[in-house]
Structures are given as C-alpha cells and as structure tokens.
C-alpha cells in the first residue's frame, strides 16, 4: 500500500508512477512479480473532478477503483463511511436472519441464548466500525 499527497494531480501521478516502478523493480529482484490486474488505485479527492491520468505497470493500465478495503475498513474516494456502514449492516442482517431460523414458537434455542447471541455477535458487528 502506498499513499501520496499533493495539490496538483499530474505531480501526484508522476510521483506515484515512480514509486510503482521502484516497487516493481524491487519485487522482480526478490522474485515476487507484481500482476497489473491485482493492483487498484483509489484517488482520495474532495472535489467531484476525476483525475484522468493513468498509472501503468508492465505497459498495462492499472484499474481505478471507487473503493478499497484496508484492514477490514472500506474506504471510498470521498472518504465517506456510507459504503463501510452499508456492508456492516448487511453482514449483521444476515447474522440476524440466521439466528431467526434457529428459533420457533415451540422449538429451538431459548430466548436468553438468542439475546446473548444478538448482543455478542450482531451488535458487535455493527459497533465495530
């Protein structure tokens, strides 16, 4: 993971291309080749303007992605939390529906155990942002 900061987009792209070339040379020296299809670029910008410069690795364009997942946190190009929160809520909803299938009116887990599962797992999924 590499992070660069700057005011002018073309300067940042030039610096990033140099960093990418350096990383590629090092990886080739230690016999860990990079594959261009496995690398993504996310431009974190405040404005709605898109940076149209493209980075290249081994003469192939690197994909621009609107989001990136780093250490379990989903970051989007505007640094908003909506994408990450929606993913967490969807995961919690799936876990809640799985718990619901384990309970019936006359069979299944007792209410105390279901409440414990809800607090320990589902709420934890939501609150660990």
Image (cartoon, grey):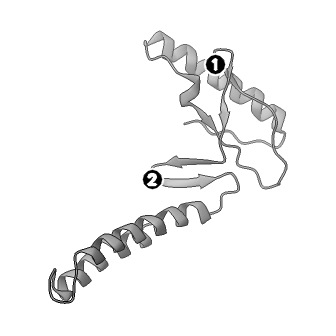
Up-down relation of residue 14 to residue 116 (above or below): above
Closer to the camera, 105 or 28? 105
Alpha-carbon span between mark 2 and mark 1: 27 Å
Q: Quadrant of the N terminus?
A: top right
Secondary structure under the numbered disc 2 in the rendered image:
loop
Residue 60 visible in image: yes
Closer to the camera, 127 or 15? 127
Picture quadrant of residue 111: bottom left
Label placed on residue 103: none
x and y percentages locating residue 99 in the rendered image? 28, 74
Closer to the camera, 17 or 74? 74
Label placed on residue 21: 1
Which residue carries the number 2 mark?
72
Up-down relation of residue 16 to residue 50 (above or below): above
Dots 2 and 1: beta carbons under 8 Å? no
Closer to the camera, 64 or 24? 64
Horizontal side, residue 3 vs residue 107: left or right:
right
Residue at coordinates 66% horizontally, 47% vertically from top-left?
66
């Amino acid at each position: 993971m590499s992070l660069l900061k700057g005011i002018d987009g073309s300067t940042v792209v030039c610096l990033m291309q140099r960093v990418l070339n350096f990383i590629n040379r090092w990886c080739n020296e230690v016999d860990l080749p990079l594959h261009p299809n496995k690398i993504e670029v996310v431009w974190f910008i405040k404005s709605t303007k898109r940076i149209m410069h493209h980075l290249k690795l081994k003469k192939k364009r690197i994909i621009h992605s609107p989001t990136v997942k780093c250490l379990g946190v989903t970051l989007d190009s505007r640094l908003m939390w909506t994408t990450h929160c929606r993913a967490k809520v969807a995961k919690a909803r799936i876990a809640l529906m799985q718990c619901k299938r384990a309970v019936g009116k006359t069979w299944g887990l007792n209410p105390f155990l279901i409440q414990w599962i809800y607090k320990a797992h589902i709420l934890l999924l939501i609150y660990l942002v």
